[in-house]
Image (cartoon, helix red, strand yellow):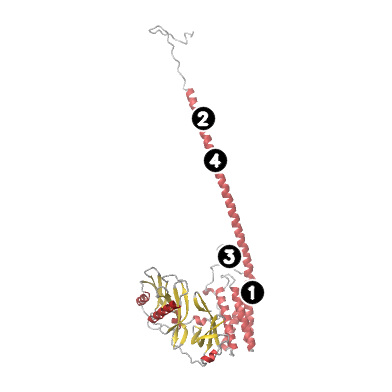
Amino acid sequence: MPSADMMKLEVIQGGSPVKRRRKRSWLPWLLGALCAGLLIWGIAATVKAKEYRSETERLTAEAEVLRADVEGYMSSSEGYRAAVERLRSSAQTMYAKGAGELADMVYDMEISLAKLIVSGSQSRKILALQEISDFAGSAAGILAQLPTSYGEAHSLNRFLVQTGDFAHMLTQSLLKGKEISQEDVEQLKSLHEACVELAERLKASAESGDIPTESLDFDGFYSEDVQTDEELPDYPTLIYDGPFSDSTEKAEPQGLTGEDISEQEALEIAGRITGVELTSYGLTEGKIPCYDFGGATEDGREVDISITRQGGMLLWYMCSAVESIQEKPSAEEYEKCLEAGEKWLAEQSFESMTPTYEQYYDGALLISFAYDADGVTVYNDLVKVWVDRTTLNVIGADARNYIFSHTERWIPEPLLTEEEAEALVSELLTIETRRLAMIPLTPQTEVLCYEFTATYDDTTYVVYINAVNGDEEQIFIIIDDENGRSAV
């Protein structure tokens, strides 16, 4: 029975005693809540840890792949660089050898020129000239294998080619019984002096290993840092009647006549020729100053045309064909195109023109017309005409040769008859056509010849016999294929 200290009795209506309740503590509830929270947090943390571990493993794997890729790239890059270095080393050896051989060839030219200058024998002169021609050709071939940035490649190449051609011209002159003139001797002396200096410079360059292989890099073999003409040394200027003579480069246009015209007048002329609306590109200076214009046809084909300032002559005109046609034209189609080209030339004031050769270009027929001077074909006075094979309209013309060369010229009387000239043609050839022609030795030098078209062993040849002295001036082989006819 509880003590009086622990319980207090009270008498209520029924007289029964009632026990007072004890207050409960909040601490157990707080501890329970904390335990539950900790349990939930632990579960969540475990899940997060697993997710983090999985993500870490994935990133680690990706990092390994990336590292392998980097190592592979570095390996291939190093291999590539090693290959380039081996190539550079090989090129260095090859170029050094070529530079030494080039110096030797120029030295040999120097020796042969020295012998030629003092030679009194025709046969010895011919032998020396042949050596010079051969050495110059070999030197030019070696030079072509060296980097474009090597020394004075452009100027040196021109010097070598001209020297070889000059020697060849003198050889032909001696074989015809002519003598080397004093003017030629002076030029030979200049060439010899140039070779002495050049041989020393090339030898020094070869011995020092001064070969520009630094231009060998990842982007290619040859550097674009090439000397300009202004930076190059001067070589002797050769004045002679050969195909590479400097004197031919100084030719002035002979075919320009009349007064200068304005840009507006040139625009009107160009518009009449093209039939399209044109825009001016301005005046181009040069040996043949001209006004340049451009535009487009109704179907979008571009048009370019140039009219000379002096005289308002057509210099250049070009537009693409309506359709792309590749096959060789029939004889009937050729005749139609020829007739269209002849009519157009007459309308542009190019009179007395005769067709020579033709070629086929992507829907157009290109016909070369030469000036006919009373039955003599003058090949220097050439106009090229493009005729559209679909429309038979002229869509292009190049009159630069004509404008440079056309003038009133003196044509000598033939001293040989046609029969006498024909007798000088090889008996192996079967002659099919004959005519007189003025053929160019250079743009400034022409010679009257009998032109014989002949065949041998299914090959067509054109032989030119000098109508004055009977020399065989030139032989061409005619190539007749799907692209047309051309002479080589």
Q: Nearer the viewer, residue 444 or 401?
A: 401
SS under mark 4: helix
Q: Considering only order in the chain, which callout, 4 or 2, is on the residue closer to the N terminus?
A: 2
Q: In which quarter of the image is residue 389?
A: bottom left
Q: In which quarter of the image is residue 299?
A: bottom left
Q: Mark 2 points at which residue?
A: 39
Alpha carbons under labels 1 and 3: distance apart: 21 Å
Q: Name the residue under label 4.
A: 54
Alpha carbons under labels 2 and 4: distance apart: 23 Å
SS under mark 1: helix
SS under mark 3: loop
Q: Name the residue under label 1.
A: 101
Q: Where is residue 261 in the image (x, y as percent from the top left)?
A: 36, 79
Alpha carbons under labels 3 and 2: distance apart: 72 Å
Residue type pointed to by label 1: Glu
Query: Is 100 displayed left or right of 62 in the figure?
Result: right
Q: Residues within 10 Å of mark 2 (few under 14, many from 20)?
A: few
Are discs 4 and 1 less than 8 Å apart at CB?
Answer: no
Residue type pointed to by label 3: Leu
Observer-side mark, 1 or 2, equals 2
